[in-house]
Amino acid sequence: MATINEYYDRLAAGYLFPEIAKRARAFSEKNPGVKLLKLGIGNSTEPLAPTVVAGLNLGADKLAKVETYTGYGDEQGDTRLRKAIAAEYAKLGANVADNEVFVSDGAKPDVGNIQSIFSPDCVVAVQDPAYPVYVDTNVIAGRGGKYDAARGCYDRMVYMPCTEENGFFPEVPTQKVDLIYICSPNNPTGAVATKEQLAKFVEYAKKNRAVIIFDSAYSQFIKDPALPRSIYEIPGAKECAIEISSFSKSAGFTGVRLGWTIVPMECVCENAAAGKLNAMWNRRQCTFFNGASNVVQEGGLAVLSEQGQKECKETIDHYMENARIIREGLSAIGLKVYGGVNAPYLWVKTPAGIKSWEFFDVLLSQAHVVTTPGAGFGPHGEGYIRVSAFGHRNDIIEAVDSVKKNLKI
């Protein structure tokens, strides 16, 4: 008799972003002709850089000729791209070998899939608030335990509070945990960890034979040279950390799909010696994955070329200028705004103690602006909204002006 995976039923509610879309759609149906101004989902909006488009075209052209046609590629990724990614880490002073790089169709699938190489009994710690995929995929795997609706959390998971008091970066757990999820620059708060803060987690992980899952999908948005773009800038991190990253936001590949995961040979855990985790992830990819698109990987190579990097930086600068406009505009009307300096997200405190979803509805009804309620990211997200800097410049200006003009609390 076939039975379902009962852990799906333990997910707290519908996925955050479809719920936002549902509410926005309902508003539009009741208010036909009203333009919605979207500052919610972090979806890139600007066109791909010319050099990147040329790379994608090259990939397609290769498939049109018998001399250059390729079928299945290596499950681990095109060797040229793996070497190019490793070279980018070398620029940061991080020694990453190309056989530690696994190219994929994006960071989000890898974040969800990486937990499959670890025991269902592992105790998971997440930053709170956290990107929902970290929590939900571990709940589905059976690591969450029961959901406590009153507290807004799962009883088997360890939540590491990110608050105004600690600058939205947590302290290391006070108990022993096995898997630690860290995102820097952080989605949703826009906070960026310092080297000193990451060093504490590396020390903790090595002491407790834990593994850090480090999400660096927004690392290219860091402007401050003192802030680390990779956890491998921290001595000893290769012994205890797996890093996952993406071309989605830095190169506009949200719909193109390309990312990578670094599983160092040195990385160990309680019952896995050096090389074991790398071998397990390799086996997982070879069994479940046929490799990223040949065409898209040519685009990835173009992104990492000197000209590609220059052009992509111009797009990143566009989004960060959007972030400045949002930050200054919302601050001007008395809202307390965090983030948006080294990250494309802004974390806005709701006024007068209003709940996150309530403030979402207020902004939607009064200013016709769509944001993301902080409560959807975990219990410590309550009392905040996330605002995204991804958008066309005119739309960003219009949305901020609408909030300034129409918001009444």
Image (cartoon, helix red, strand yellow):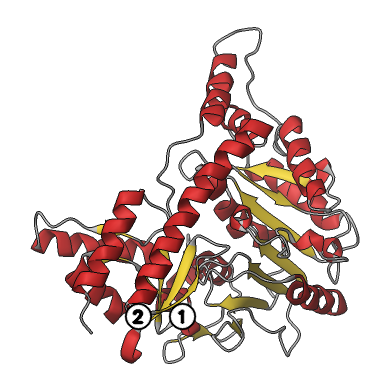
Q: Nearer the viewer, residue 167 or 263?
A: 167
Q: Is residue 79 left or right of residue 38?
A: right
Say the numbered circle drawn on residue 356.
2
- Mark 1 vs 2: CB contact within 8 A: yes
Horizontal and vertical percent for residue 245? 64, 52
Q: Position of residue 205 (x, y in %)?
A: 80, 75
Q: Quadrant of the C terminus?
A: bottom left
Name the kind of residue labelled 2 in the image. Ser
Which residue is painted at 44% across and 48% down in the image? 44
Q: What is the x, y in percent for residue 207? A: 87, 79
Q: Which residue is mark 1?
A: 381
Tell me the amino acid under the disc marked 1.
Gly
- Can the viewer see residue 107 in this picture? yes
Residue 273 in percent (x, y) is at 90, 62
Q: Is residue 75 above or below residue 266?
A: above
Q: Is residue 383 above or below residue 280?
A: below
Q: Quadrant of residue 215?
A: bottom right
| Residue drawn at (49%, 38%) of the image | 256
Q: Residue at x 36, y 50 (%)?
A: 393
* SS type, badge 2: helix
